[in-house]
Amino acid sequence: MLAEALKECGAIKFGDFTLASGKKSRYYVDIKKASTNPRILKIIAHEIKEKISSHSISADYIGCVALGGVPIAVAVSLETGLPLIIIRKEVKEYGTKGQIVGEFRPGESVLMVEDVATTGGSVLKAIEMLRGEGVVVRYVIVVVDREEGALAALSKAGVELIPLVSASELLES
C-alpha cells in the first residue's frame, strides 16, 4: 500500500540526480511529496507503529534528523505518544546553540526514523551525537531504503535498519 501511495503522489522521479551522499542516481525519492500529504503521512506513521510492534521495539523517544525526518517523526510521535527528539545537522549560532532539540536523560533510548537511507551517513552522525550524550540507539526505521549501503553501515554501528519499503520494490513496474 505504501509503495503504491509513494508512486501515486509523484515521490519517485527519474532522470539524473545527485544524492545527499554525493552519489549519482537515475532515480530520486522525493519523500517530501509524501510527508507533506496528510493521507500518506498517516500511512507512514501507522506502518512505523506496526514495525515497532512487530519488532518488539521499546523506546523512550522518537528521534529524527532535520529536516526530512521531522514530519515523519512528529506523525509517529503523535501515533505512539512518545516524545520527540530532533537532531540538527549543524549547530545553530543563536539561542542555546544546541544541536539536539528535546529533553532526554542518559540511559534512555531513542528510536530513529528516517525518510530515505542511501549510505546511512546522516543518521549515523546523529546516532553518534546521541550516543555521545549517553542515549541508547539500536533501531532506525526508514520509509525508503535505497539499498546502497545504509543497512551494512548501520549494522556495523550496532544499529538495525528496518525499512518500510525498499528501492527494489519501488522500482518494480
Image: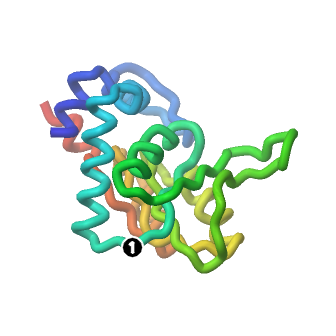
Position in image of residue 31 (x %, y %) = 39, 32
The residue shown at (70%, 71%) is: 132
Of 131 and 72, which appears nearest the observer? Answer: 72
The residue shown at (27%, 22%) is: 9
Of 143 and 57, which appears nearest the observer? Answer: 57
Of 143 and 72, which appears nearest the observer? Answer: 72
Which of the 4 image quarters holds residue 44?
Answer: top left
Position in image of residue 133 (x %, y %) = 70, 70
- Name the quarter where the N terminus is drawn: top left
Q: How is the image coloured?
A: rainbow
Q: Say left or right for 101 vs 38.
A: right
Label 1's element? loop
The residue shown at (58%, 55%) is: 85
Amino acid type at mark 1: Ser
Crowdedness near tag 1: few (<14), some (14–19) or many (≥20) residues, C-alpha within 10 Å:
few
- Name the quarter where the C terminus is drawn: top left
Query: How many circles with numbers are drawn on the protein?
Result: 1
Position in image of residue 99 (x %, y %) = 73, 51
Q: Relative to 125, is 116 above or below?
A: above
Q: Say left or right for 39 vs 102.
A: left
Q: Relative to 107, is 32 above or below?
A: above
Of 72 and 12, which appears nearest the observer? Answer: 72
Q: Tell which residue pokes out farthest to the bottom in this image.
A: 107
The residue shown at (24%, 58%) is: 50
| Residue 26 showing in the rendered view | no
Q: Relative to 96, is 11 above or below?
A: above
Q: Relative to 21, is 48 above or below?
A: below
Q: Which residue is mark 1?
A: 58
| Residue 42 showing in the rendered view | yes
Position in image of residue 103 (x %, y %) = 65, 61
